Every structure is written in structure tokens, then in C-alpha cells.
Amino acid sequence: MNALPIDYYVWLSAALFTIGVLGVLYRRNAIIIFMCIELMLNAVNLLLVAFSSRLNDPSGQVFVFFIMAVAAAEVAVGLAILVTMYRSTRSTDINILNRLKW
């Protein structure tokens, strides 16, 4: 059984990363921005696993495991901050949250 060419993984990863970047740039909801950041991380993880599999080197897959662990911690801290901000402003809009600084 032949594996798919590496080009397919590169194009899929580029498309996912582009969707994530556009979501971060154009959306104003903080929760959606966090989801788009996670989408960008997953695009990079997909590319790392594809190249690691192609080169028969498991170090890329181990690196992906650590990236996913750090991303899970980042989401937990980010959502805790968002819940705290939502309690004080009753909104997750970035423009309203931006007014909280001096």
C-alpha cells in the first residue's frame, strides 16, 4: 500500500495554517481566536508528522507530542483568563477587552 505524496500533506497543512491566520486577523471573538491558534498549531503538527513519517525518523512525532502537551496547557490558561474577563465585562469581544488596559 503506497502512502500519499508529501505534497498533499504540505498543501493541506498550508491551507489549515492560512485559515487559522485569517481567523486570528479578522475575527473579534477571543474564543474563536484561540481556536484559530490551535488550528495553526495542528497544521504544523500535521506537517511534522508527515515529514517524520516520510524520513522514518520518530523524533518529529515525539516533538509533536510535546507541542500538543504545551498547547493543552496554553488552552487551559487562556480559557481561565477568558472566563475571568467575561465575568467582569460580560463579553468576549477583543475590542471590549482591549479597553481594560490603562
Image: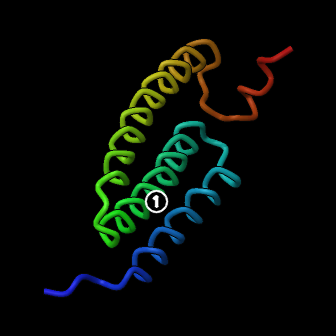
Residue drawn at 41 percent across, 55 percent down: 45
Along the horizontal axis of the image, is 17 left or right of 71?
right
Along the horizontal axis of the image, is 37 left or right of 71?
right
Quadrant position of the C terminus in the picture: top right
Where residue 90 appears, as percent x and y from the top left, is: 59, 21
Identify whether 51 is placed above or below 45: below
Where residue 24 appears, as percent x and y from the top left, is: 64, 50
Among the 4 quarters of the image, the one containing residue 91 = top right
Say which of 42 and 5 sits in front.
Answer: 5
Among the 4 quarters of the image, the one containing residue 28 = top right
Residue placed furthest toward the left = 1
- At label 1, counting other C-alpha atoms closer than 10 Å, the crowd grade (few under 14, some 14-19, many 20 or more) is many
| Mark 1 element type | helix
Quadrant position of the N terminus in the picture: bottom left
Along the horizontal axis of the image, is 58 left or right of 38?
left
- Colouring chosen for the image of the structure: rainbow
Residue identifier under label 1: 43
Where residue 34 appears, as percent x and y from the top left, is: 53, 40
Identify whether 4 is placed above or below 24: below
Residue drawn at 75 percent across, 34 percent down: 95
Say which of 21 and 68 sits in front.
Answer: 68
Where residue 23 appears, as percent x and y from the top left, is: 60, 55
Identify whether 102 is placed above or below 45: above
Q: Which amino acid type is shown beneath numbered disc 1?
A: Ala
Residue placed furthest toward the right = 102
Count of all numbered marks drawn on residues in the image: 1
Residue drawn at 37 percent across, 40 percent down: 68
